[in-house]
Amino acid sequence: MDRAVMGHGVRLMDKPITVSVPGARAKFEEWIKTRGGILVWENVNLSDPGAGAMFTPVRDAEGKENDKNAYPKWTHRYHETCTDIKDFKFVKEMVEVNRFRVAIRMGSQGLTLKLTDASTKKLNKALDKAKEKTGQDASYRFDYDTQEAVIEVPLWE
């Protein structure tokens, strides 16, 4: 199966389906034109409900139809097939609205790094404030070089 496109914050019952990966429109247009459309895979991972949907083409590079029962990851299941680009709303870019240093600690097994409780609270508060200020759902990423949380909101096409 082709490399999937991940999209956070997708509401699968609504149209248009939001795709929060900048640059995904071109790939989706190509898949609709040459690969039979887009398979939408619903996130069913209860441990990570915000992970969003995945998207793959209907047919692989050789023209064979992808099996709707062969999920790209155990965390997702088939939801629907879309053949119209108007079924989607694409993010143009993610705009940084805040950044701040975070403290990290070792996970309980000693193999992962996690935010401290104070940094987790600070991050959640910053996400709420960004949503309140912009009216958009905010997301975050980590700048590992500076050990900062970067708060971003989508700028839609």
Image (cartoon, rainbow, N blue to C red):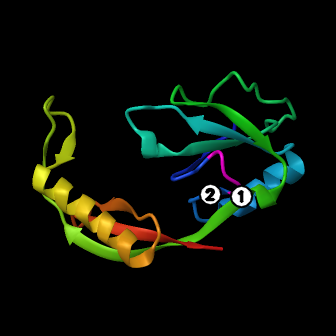
Closer to us: 128 or 113: 128
Which region is colored magenta? 12-16
Residue 132 in the image, given as x and y percentages of width and height: 36, 72
In the rendered structure, the answer to whether residue 74 lies left or right of residue 84 reads left
**Occupied quadrant, residue 77:** top right
Q: Residues within 10 Å of mark 2 (few under 14, many from 20)?
A: many
Q: Which residue is mark 1?
A: 88
- Mark 2 falls on what kind of element? strand
In the rendered structure, the answer to whether residue 117 lies left or right of residue 76 reads left
**Is the magenta region chiefly helix, strand or loop?**
loop
The residue drawn where x is 82% and y is 45% is 37
Q: Residues within 10 Å of mark 1 (few under 14, many from 20)?
A: some
Residue 68 in the image, given as x and y percentages of width and height: 73, 26
Q: Which residue is mark 2?
A: 18
The residue drawn where x is 71% and y is 62% is 25
**Occupied quadrant, residue 113:** top left
Disc with the residue nearer the chain's start (1 vs 2):
2
Confirm whether residue 156 shows in the render. yes
Residue 22 in the image, given as x and y percentages of width and height: 59, 65
